[in-house]
Image (tube, grey):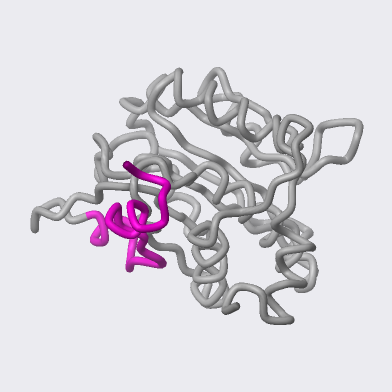
Amino acid sequence: AQVCNKQRLLELIHDFIVFDAGVKKTCRHNQYFGVAATKPFIQRNEGGIIWHTQGSGKTALAYYSVRSLTDFYAAKNTAVKFYFIVDRLDLMEQAKDEFVARGLSVRTANSRDELMSDIRSTNLTENAEGKAEIMVVNIQKFKQDSAKIQIDSNYSIQLQRIFFIDEAHRGYNPHGSFLANLLAADKDAIKIALTGTPLLKEERESWRVFGDYIDTYYYDKSIADGYTL
């Protein structure tokens, strides 16, 4: 009943129904509320951490975010580009397959130059069908590249970049790595960290790197909902 009040029902119909490999699906409730919780942060031009348990569908959550946030920025006459950062080849392929199955056009970067060229570009789509796009990046390829990064922000259009950092707890170095330099160079980018197990030790707490918790969905709730055994 809470999910399907009038406003939420309209949002579900508009942004949260998808044909996944030919099967009509909608989101899990934690995915809907995760996307909804992002909006106040986005309005303040802030990112943060979505702490959802393993197996809760964080890649799907990122997909629904792309649909919802594209409309949000369109209402502000602002162009938006999305990036999904992983740290392993198998995760890149998995994310790519999931996004494509749901109808997104996916680009990948095989080198630093290719990634930086895409980031600097103001072209929002490269596919001929005009589908919404996301770039999936395996940061493991060049995460040790510590060279300084310069991004020209003097564009003739308003452009917002949004980075989803998958498995944000794992091996992320907040100083000196390529990803750290990239996120630091793009001061106006919004970073949304996705993790099922954030770092909690005081010296490396995830929130110190990525900001406050946007939404939480713990494994005990997933067990109660029947998603986790």
Q: Position of residue 108 (x, y in %)?
A: 61, 25
Image quadrant assignment for residue 89: top left
Q: Position of residue 131 (x, y in %)?
A: 83, 40
- Residue reaching furthest right? 129
Q: In this view of the protein, which residue sits in the foreground, 198 or 219?
A: 219
Highlighted magenta segment, given as a residue range:
206-229
- Whether the magenta-drawn stretch holds residue 188 is answered as no
Q: In this view of the protein, which residue sits in the foreground, 186 or 49?
A: 49
- Residue reaching furthest left? 202
Q: In this view of the protein, which residue sits in the foreground, 60 or 209?
A: 60
| Image quarter in which the C terminus is found | top left
**Residue 42 vs residue 214: left or right?**
right
Image quadrant assignment for residue 145: top left
The structure residue drawn at horizontal position 72% and vertical position 80%, both measured from the top left corner, is 7
**Residue 97 vs residue 91: left or right?**
right
Q: Position of residue 195 (x, y in %)?
A: 34, 47
Q: Position of residue 117 (x, y in %)?
A: 64, 32
| Image quarter in which the N terminus is found | bottom right
